[in-house]
Image (cartoon, grey):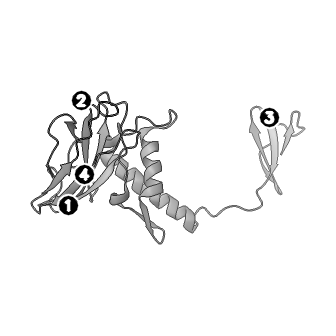
Amino acid sequence: MAIFKNSTFGNIRKSIGDDVAYRSGGQNIVRKKPAQVNDANSFAQRKQRNAMREVVNLFRAIGSQTKGNFPQRDAKHSAYNAFAGKALKEAIVFTGDQATIDLASLSVAKGTLPMPQVSAFADAGTGSASVSFADLVDNVQLFPNDKLVITKIGNMGSAPSAPGKFDLGSALPTSINGFGSISGEVVSIYAHNESENGAKVSDSIYLGTIETV
């Protein structure tokens, strides 16, 4: 790259042979053209674009449910950045260059609190599932007013309802339904713990699915 402070050609632009001239910061700059231009439609780039499209579309559908689920993220990252980073790394499945999201591998929350413990989850076949959560209140990391959060995501991209929140010190749910989802949709269920003030969460766990009726 060359910089011309007083070019006899004035403000030079465009290319001459293998050189490209342009203005930047009030200076005339000349640089060599790249020896090789990467194919913008290579197989790897198509995979990346398709994966990003799937993640963006999912976040648009469920972002309102998950935007508070990454409070301990890097300050320079948004909730979308945190969600997308984990989804791209953990939940994308490729068939050729086509991407889909494996909802069973998706994380909808990330943090340092202890994760919920579930001893049983079973679809009852009536649009609901029975579930058994362990009591994890220890007054050290988890307190009675902290929350168990239930998130639902339909396989057609819907967010059936706002996340359900239950005080850890109260009776925890023994049944979860797919209320609000599209008829015939398969709804994936996730759970995570959240501090009373929302400043901390746990990693989410995937419980299973409910087929709506």
Q: Mark 2 highlights which residue?
A: 145
Question: Do the residues bearing badges 4 and 1 touch, measured as CB atoms within 8 Å?
Answer: no
Q: Secondary structure at mark 2?
A: loop
Q: Nearer the viewer, residue 45 or 160?
A: 160
Question: Going by the image, does 184 lie left or right of 19?
Answer: left
**Callout 4: few (<14), some (14-19), or many (20+) C-alpha neighbours within 10 Å?**
some
The residue mark sitting in front, 3 or 1, is 1
* Spatial separation of the CA atoms under disc 4 and disc 3: 64 Å
The residue mark sitting in front, 2 or 1, is 2
Image: 179 above or below 114: below
**Callout 3: few (<14), some (14-19), or many (20+) C-alpha neighbours within 10 Å?**
some
Res 36 seen here: yes
Question: Do the residues bearing badges 4 and 3 touch, measured as CB atoms within 8 Å?
Answer: no
Tell me the kind of residue under disc 1.
Glu
Question: Going by the image, does 127 lie left or right of 164?
Answer: left
Question: Going by the image, does 151 lie left or right of 93?
Answer: left
Q: Mark 1 highlights which residue?
A: 185
Tell me the kind of residue under disc 2.
Asn
Mark 4 / mark 2, whichever is N-terminal: 4
Write down the quadrant of residue 148 in the picture.
Answer: top left
Q: What number is the disc on residue 118?
A: 4
Tell me the kind of residue under disc 4.
Val
Q: Mark 3 highlights which residue?
A: 27
Q: Nearer the viewer, residue 138 or 104?
A: 138
* Spatial separation of the CA atoms under disc 2 and disc 1: 33 Å
> Image point 52% across, 64% down: which residue?
46
